[in-house]
Image: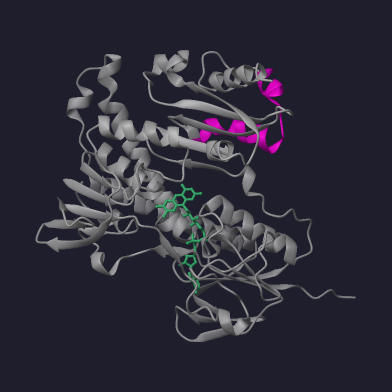
Amino acid sequence: MIVPMTAVVIVGGGPGGYDAALVAAQMGAEVTLVDSDGIGGSAVLTDCVPSKALLAVAESATQVRQSGLLGITGAAEAIGVDLAAVNARIRGLAGSQSADTAERCVREGVRLLAGRGRLDGPGAVVAELASGGTQRIEADAILLATGARPRTLDSALPDGQRILTWEQVYELAEVPERLVVVGSGVTGAEFACAYQALGSEVVLVSSREHVLPGEDPEAAQVLEDVFERRGMTVLRRTRATAATRTGDSVVVTLADGSTVTGSHCLMAVGSVPNTEDLGLPGAGVRTTDAGHVEVDRVSRTSARGVYAAGDCTGVLLLASVAAMQGRIAMWHALGGAVAPLDLRTVSSNVFTDPEIATVGYTQADVDAGRVRADVVTLPLATNARAKMQGISDGFVKVICRRGTRIVIGGVVVAPKASELIFGLSLAVEQRMTVDEVAATFTVYPSLTGSLAEAARRLRAFD
Ligand SMILES: Cc1cc2nc3c(=O)[nH]c(=O)nc-3n(C[C@H](O)[C@H](O)[C@H](O)COP(=O)(O)OP(=O)(O)OC[C@H]3O[C@@H](n4cnc5c(N)ncnc54)[C@H](O)[C@@H]3O)c2cc1C
């Protein structure tokens, strides 16, 4: 007997879509991936990859600028940034990453269609092809992974030259003289950090009391201190209501009627899901008031056979989570073993300088009594390796459940925290106790030594 192949159609080629396409192809499905803007999605072409590449340049510039502290002379004074060259390199590497991903999809048997897809009922997708014409594809399972785009305000419409979204900054030929960043969430903080390091005078407009309102408060405080020490102006509890171009400058109006002027303004005020014009109501796919596709923990929508993953679901706006949601959808649809999405073990990072990496339960969970836990925080200023490297800002924090002593969360604020967090992520995922972490050798001298030291100190609690 010939078993018919399962037909899978995926709309959107970002991490939520392409990773799922690869999994489905490996599981033997006939997979079509429809994407309108380039495989890799916003993650590769406009968001994660370019911003992290820009921050890598900024990190190098900061190291050179601070080299005087270590006794290196001449470098800090000589530093210059050719932003046109920096951006050309970034656009190039984003493009080649997208091409590599597309090539891998094709190699693994995924059929790629360039165009816009929308549901035609719950069992088919119609693609308006970039090359002209349309194609209707019937499917046993459909995955929507259409992502999100920058939110814009009618009173501060981006012009791509001086009033910018985060997608438009890679066309800048020169470092902005004075950049007003509106929004102090992760994206706003990362770009504020990057351009300050590249030489811009930066004003960060934060509607909250502190930058990074969603992050560990002590970590946010460290970052705010560093920002201000390096000369950034942070306007707290200040909402921007408009941004207007006047010749070579941008005037940003604040809620109290006052204004801030910059040569450029970057709007980082959140994102909106790409869920209009997808034929959702006709297919019986429910959305939230904010327009996100409603999904359960195995990525099912309200329509049978239709799944959704990534930013269009609003579950947690991370590439890693999008990819996991997409994989889970395919495992579920194609009958593989599947564990529901568990956000408690997600590690994430803010790529500022210093970086802020977190995993698992947070200080806010402990303070609010959502979990009974003990917390130890160790400043890096006492770590031998940190002293050698001239690192004075940052800390490690380890959180363990009271009673069982199992590590349930942590924070690392340090250069390369995104790498250092892995030990804690492993401990959280594998439900290791502080004794087990404390008994693990760390290199001497190393920043990870502080993680083991924090675990040792937690052993004393009981
Ligand atoms: C500045 C910035 C930096 C970030 N940095 C990080 C980071 O360092 N690490 C991290 O984990 N996350 C990061 N994120 C978040 C991350 O980019 C997103 O979570 C991730 O892109 C979500 O993946 P996705 O597949 O849902 O959507 P996307 O990556 O947005 O891909 C969706 C794709 O679908 C296409 N599409 C939309 N509608 C249709 C349609 N109708 N038909 C066909 N195709 C369609 C889009 O054009 C796009 O190509 C960052 C976000 C921003 C804004």
In this view, the residue in front, 150 or 399, is 399
Whether residue 429 is in magenta: the answer is yes
Q: Quadrant of residue 80?
A: top left
Q: Position of residue 33 (x, y in %)?
A: 58, 69
Can you name the residue that lies furthest to the front here? 369
Q: Residue at x 30, y 54 (%)?
A: 170
Q: Position of residue 395 (x, y in %)?
A: 47, 25
In this view, the residue in front, 86 or 408, is 408
Q: Residue at x 19, y 21 (%)?
A: 74
Q: Residue at x 63, y 80 (%)?
A: 284
Which segment did they paint magenta? 418-440
Q: Is residue 261 left or right of residue 102?
A: left
Q: Is residue 389 left or right of residue 298?
A: left
Majority secondary structure of magenta residues: helix
In this view, the residue in front, 312 or 243, is 243
- The image's colouring method is one colour
Q: Quadrant of residue 267?
A: bottom left
Q: Is residue 246 above or below residue 81?
A: below
Whether residue 403 is in magenta: the answer is no
Q: Position of residue 76 (x, y in %)?
A: 22, 26
Quarter of the image with the N terminus in it: bottom right
Residue 176 appearing in the image: no
Q: Quadrant of residue 449?
A: top right
Q: Is residue 437 above or below residue 305?
A: above
Can you name the residue that lies furthest to the left here? 247
